[in-house]
Image (spheres, helix red, strand yellow):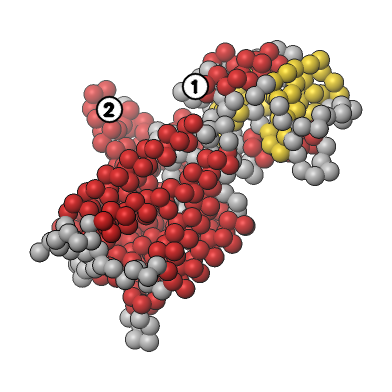
Amino acid sequence: MGLSYSFPSHAQSTALPDNIRGALCLVRADEQIVLVNEKITGKFSLPGGGISSHEPASVAAEREAWEETGLVVTAKSVIGYTDTAVIFDCVSDSELVAYEFQNREGGYVLPIWFAPHYGVETNSAMLIDPNRVNASQYRYPEQWNAIRKIFAIASEQPALYLEDLINAAPVFHQREIELIQKIQNSISSLPEPLSNIIESIIITGDIFGQSWLILILFPLLFSCVKKQTAIKVMFVFVCTSLLALVARQGFSLPAPYAYFPELQRLPDVGLSFPNIAITLWVSCSLVLMSSLKWLDWNKFSALIFTIGVWFGLSQLCAGVTYFSDIVVGAILGVLIAWHVERLERKPEIDLGKLLSSKGLWCGMALICLILTMIWPQPIFTQWLGATVTIAVVFCLPGSSFSFEGRSLAPLVISIGLMTVSSFALNYLKMQLNYSSLYILIVDMLRFPLMVSVWLFVYMSCLKGPKVR
């Protein structure tokens, strides 16, 4: 994929080649370039995107810069082309603001929590010296050297560096940010070996919020408890995720590090209210314990409580969530579990039969489709693929099979194969990182593939001995 550059020409007067379908903004400030970190590909790129019908390319560039970085810019002139996009020399209409904090790439983080596509298309944006960026880090590596040459003829502008923008946060969050800062400072003030050990122990709790745990927990759940109980937990997991995601879109409250990036200790991006992982942990744990008659204080409930507190503390101390996010997430989880149990106690409703019906899961898939149309985001397309897969499974003639009580071999083999498949998909994503569409398709197919592998192993071992 080639890239050419030319002498600057007026943005509105330049006739574009027929192959041009996108517009990019090159913003230069303080001898540095503005780059965004793409959410889907994980690569750096110039702010930009597709040109809408009857939209001038310069207007498209300005619009995309606002949507991805929150910068209001003016596209002054055309300074280059890729095979499918035009590159504009863009200047911010106001002083460009960046944080004093430098990320691991050596770039100055930009405050972009108010950008329309923050957490949707872009993870972050930064102001960075082009010489610090390797070609392999850019979405199209073969273009990077040419972009550096174009950068040399782009308009220079000043930048303003600030330590934080805590005062821009809601009042109730300002106090919590100060609390997080005090906790981190208290740990850092300890003797170095001790502070490192304590921070490592606390941050390790984040492992309980990792998506790969699903590869272990759900096959284990279906193997160890009655199928009706496992399906109920799965239903609660899906419903809780969708409700929390919709709530997160509605409130649109960014994480603490959006206002003070130095707080961030864990990789994370986007909005934080409510804390979805805590909501899932509470709702699914309560439903499971209720089904197993383990709601009283025992070793299992103590373990669940300890893990929840550990995980919440790790998120809080890492600066990726507020205490209020955790509390509201836990309350929402309790309410969801209470409603499910209340529904199960109604004599006129056979909850087990309802949750195993193909109509319910087809309805869930339809809800995901509607949510995807309202918020065309990767997370909703992934849930669409997941619910469609579950609906297909319940439509199969053999959907009445039982999982519990089978030998350990199918469980171990299925978890192993799903893990290998997940690594294979991650490798495939690395090879396809030039295309957002391809990566989105891979992510959407991840859950269907995992379920297919799991069911294939189970059906292959169907004649194996059961555990007594």
Residue sitting farthest toward the bottom? 348
Q: Position of residue 163 (x, y in %)?
A: 54, 27
Precedes in sequence: disc 1 or disc 2: 1
Q: CA distance from mark 1 to mark 2?
A: 23 Å
Q: Position of residue 103 (x, y in %)?
A: 49, 25
Q: Is residue 347 visible?
A: yes
Q: Is residue 456 above or below residue 112?
A: below
Q: Position of residue 81 (x, y in %)?
A: 74, 24
Q: Is residue 325 visible?
A: no
Circle 2 residues within 10 Å: few <14, some 14–19, many ≥20:
some
Asked whether disc 1 touches disc 2, contact meaning CB atoms under 8 Å apart, the reply is: no
Circle 1 residues within 10 Å: few <14, some 14–19, many ≥20:
few
Instruction: Determine whether the residue tagged by mark 1 lies in a helix, strand or loop.
Output: loop
From the image, tell me which residue sits under label 2: 196
What numbered label is drawn on residue 158?
A: none
Q: Nearer the viewer, residue 223 or 203?
A: 223
From the image, tell me which residue sits under label 1: 105
Amino acid marked by disc 1: Glu
Q: Is residue 381 left or right of residue 193?
A: right
Amino acid marked by disc 2: Asn
Q: Is residue 297 left or right of residue 392?
A: left
Q: Nearer the viewer, residue 257 or 74?
A: 74
**Residue pictured at 59% horizontal, 62% vertical:** 370
Count of picture labels:
2
**Residue pictured at 53% horizontal, 17% vertical:** 134
**Residue pictured at 37% horizontal, 46% vertical:** 211
Instruction: Determine whether the residue tagged by mark 2 lies in a helix, strand or loop.
Output: helix
Q: Position of residue 265 (x, y in %)?
A: 40, 33
